[in-house]
Image (spheres, helix red, strand yellow):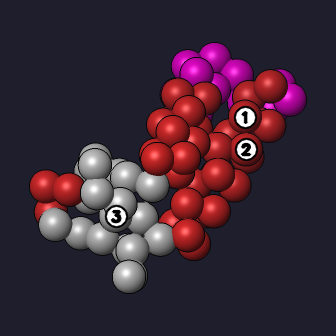
Amino acid sequence: MKRNMSDVDRIVRVILAALFAYLYFGGIVTGTLGIVLVVLGAIFLLTALVAFCPLYAPFKFSTYKK
């Protein structure tokens, strides 16, 4: 996998993942929406850690500047 995410993009994803986790585990958002936020947060965290977004690849989009 070739890197296609900038550091700013990765930081934003980690912050959003933390926010989603806080909303769910803090009991602010519950039910189906809470589960969706946790799953989305996990995806954001995983893509931030590997610096590759699979949705960027088919569109040849990259926020990473060499």
- Residue visible at 52% across and 28% down? 39
66 relative to 42 in the view: left or right: left
- Residue visible at 37% across and 52% down? 52
Residue flagged by tag 1: what amino acid is it? Ala
Front-most of 11 and 27?
11
Residue 44 makes an appearance in the image: no
Residue flagged by tag 2: what amino acid is it? Ala
Q: Residue furthest right?
A: 26
Q: Which residue is mark 2?
A: 18
Circles 2 and 1, Cβ within 8 Å, touching? The answer is yes
Q: Is residue 35 found inside the magenta-colored segment of the image?
A: yes
Spatial CA distance of label 1 from label 3 is 25 Å
State the extent of the magenta-drawn residues as a range.
26-37
Q: Residue furthest bottom?
A: 66
Badge 2 marks a residue whose secondary structure is: helix
Quadrant of the rendered image containing residue 26 = top right
Badge 3 marks a residue whose secondary structure is: loop
Q: Which residue is mark 1?
A: 21
Residue flagged by tag 3: what amino acid is it? Asn
Q: Residues within 10 Å of mark 2 (few under 14, many from 20)?
A: some
Give the total of numbered labels.
3
Spatial CA distance of label 3 from label 2 is 22 Å
